[in-house]
Amino acid sequence: MDNYHQRITSFFDGRNSYDSEGRGHPENTRRLINFVKVQSTQAVLDLSTGTGLVAIPVAKIVGLQGSVIGVDLSSGMLAQAEAKIKAEASII
């Protein structure tokens, strides 16, 4: 892995408070989902999925008949997304 890629990955791996950094992220997520008009049964690819701010609500919209794949270079961000998914699954 080159030095730049390693620095970027390390930076995002350490961002544990990403979801709560102001109101912008959740608001932008809502706007994006409304803009692209996500519908049930769609297949969605979320590049740079991060902590799942877009992928998780989109998965709720597309339902069991659809699918969402989230890709990110940060294993730390993906771990946060996975924890959020598991926490939501335990409430259902």
Image: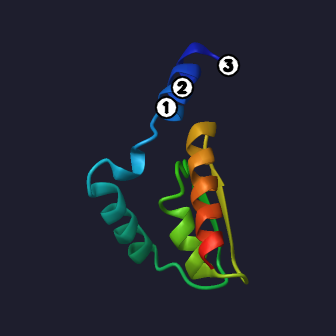
**Residue neighbourhood size for the residue with mark 1, other residues' Cα within 10 Å, grouped as few (<14), some (14–19), many (≥20):** few
Q: Amino acid at mark 1?
A: Gly
* Colouring used for the render: rainbow
Toward the top, the furthest residue is 3
Q: Nearer the viewer, mark 3 or mark 1?
A: 1
Q: Earlier in the sequence, mark 3 or mark 2?
A: 3
Q: Are marks 1 and 2 in contact (CB under 8 Å)?
A: yes
CA gap between label 1 and label 2 equals: 6 Å
> Which quadrant does the C terminus fall into?
bottom right
Vertical order, 70 against 13 (above or below): below
Q: CA distance from mark 3 to mark 1?
A: 18 Å
Q: Residue at x 45, y 73 (%)?
A: 36
Relative to 21, does residue 4 appear above or below in the rendering? above
Q: Report which residue position mark 2 lands on.
A: 10
Identify the residue position indicated by label 3 in the image. Answer: 1
Q: Position of residue 72 (x, y in %)?
A: 61, 44
Task: Specify the amino acid type for callout 2.
Answer: Ser
In the image, residue 23 lies at what x, y percent?
A: 26, 58
Q: Label 1 belongs to which residue? A: 14
Closer to viewer: mark 1 or mark 2:
1
Say if residue 26 shows up in the picture: yes
